[in-house]
Amino acid sequence: MDVLERKAALTGIGQSDVGRRLNRDPLELTVDACLAAIADAGLTRDDIDGLSTYPGPPIGGAAGFSGAGIVDIHDILRLKLDWYCGGPELPGQLGAVINACAAVATGLARHVLCFRTVYESTAQGGGRRRGIGVGGAGGGGSFRAGGFMQWVLPYGAASAANWIAMMARRHFHEYGTTREQLGQIALNARKNAGRNPKAIYRDPMTMDDYLNVRMVSDPFCLYDCDVPVDGSTAFVVSAVDAAKDTRKKPLRVEAVGSALRGRPSWDQFDDLTTMALRDASAMMWERTDLTPRDVDVAELYDGFSFIAMAWLEALGFCGKGEGGPFIEGGERIALDGEIPLNTHGGQLSAGRLHGFGFLHEACVQLWGEGGERQVAGEPGVAVAAAGGGPLGGCLLLTND
Amino acid sequence: MSEKPFRIKPAVTDENEHFWQGGADGELRFLRCKACRSYIHPPAPICGECLTKDYAPEAVSGRARLVTYTVNHQPWIPGFDPPYVIAIVEIEEQPSVRLTTNLVNCEIDDIAIGMPLRVVFEQLDDETYLPLFEPAGE
């Protein structure tokens, strides 16, 4: 198999301030992250000839879900681009990075700047989190839901918390998974966040805390749900021949997973206990001789705790349905465990940077820049995965 | 959910009115392909299984089984007060056709995945009837 993405490498990472209600212009956060990534790669903006993002420009009805689009950053930085692409219909948030890999591998660009900006904390203000699309309801009663939302909004199923809670409930039913097991995803994230100075929630969490906090959508309690933040994350993806000019040792892309082989639907997909994660993971392993046993660190989307467990299963760190017993007690996924998971605290405790935070942390670990949270033994292979439900994409990186 | 909640209405169109208006006749209806006999959901301009355009709305029995559920505790929508039960059900005639819906007339402690259900309708206005599901007994 001709695995073209191996012509791509991660050469620089950048991240803005990350926090609750920063009340800063999301374009400024984006610029901060982008310039940091370009500098980290040892490049200048004149070297950037590609631009990629998810989910595109800010849209109504989803407050703070996007802070900048392609046109914004193209113009602000006066970039001269040969290739650019931004949009929401991708294999998860990291689909924007997978697109960049394809662009440099096919010669459409040499250095692609990828970014993702959220300002959900400031945009949602002091109010509670809203459901998706509910912003259009207004309260006047004249709003009517179309598209996919017509099948869920009339039933008050207004959030991915509801849709994914039902996936978790099905997993509990089929495999006997328990809340105490699932809670280890949240506890592990909080423990690691304690070692990450940029994380939002760093105070220790106990299993009692987890089991006694209020429910959101059964079996999900508050601590199964990630924390909205403001922040921007950026990467430079370079063609391997162009990467010879960069400052740091390039992180090679060994394989990507972008597949979705079932129906692209939250409720019509054949297996509700895995969904897109199954297909993206399968595709990634089809494209490499490496196996899950070769992976030293896993940064797996935890917008809801269950998704991280489902990625562990889909990626083959344990068998299908065995996620509960695998994470029970938390030792296996701890910083010094057999597969350290979400070493920065994940979205549950470090903040909802929406997918890009996981790839950022995978690069941090492979470059040995983790400081207090650095995984011992110089990790050489990392997997970063983002998305849940019918959205999912993953990348396998090596520093050899 | 003894009091009727405020519900956001679906946008009823030529393509989906067989579904949202079936409740006027007490019928749960889906498009059904006349060639391969598959039910088509959500409504589409072609049968996604056999790619023929020969289809028509057809009533099903209204019997279904519970695939999964969640008890929602978060107030997402003003006037739609928690707790309430959101469910995914599969229809008896073709289990690959699923609906996200509300489970009603059922104590939370009595909910069991796999339990048999039957459709009931909640009328929202002259052209909109929401299919909900309640326990059917064995």
Image (cartoon, coloured by chain):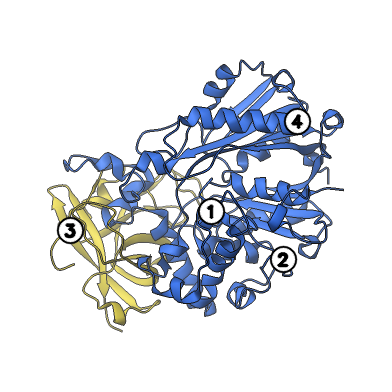
Q: Is residue A31 above or below residue A149?
A: above
| Structural distance between the alpha carbons of marks 1 and 3 | 33 Å
From this viewpoint, is residue A95 visible?
A: yes
Q: Which residue is mark 2?
A: A339
Q: The residue tagged with tag 2: helix, strand or loop?
A: loop
> Dot 1: within a 10 Å radius of its alpha carbon, few (fewer than 14), some, or many (20 or more) residues?
many
Chain containing mark 2 = A
From this viewpoint, is residue B96 visible?
A: no
Same chain check for tags 4 and 1: yes
Q: Which chain is yellow?
A: B
Choose the circle earlier in sequence order: 2 or 1: 2
Q: Which residue is mark 1?
A: A347
Q: Position of residue A133 (x, y in %)?
A: 34, 43
User: Do labels 1 and 3 touch, CB within 8 Å?
Assistant: no
Chain containing mark 1 = A
Which quadrant of the figure has residue A43?
A: top right
Chain containing mark 4 = A
Chain A palette colour: blue
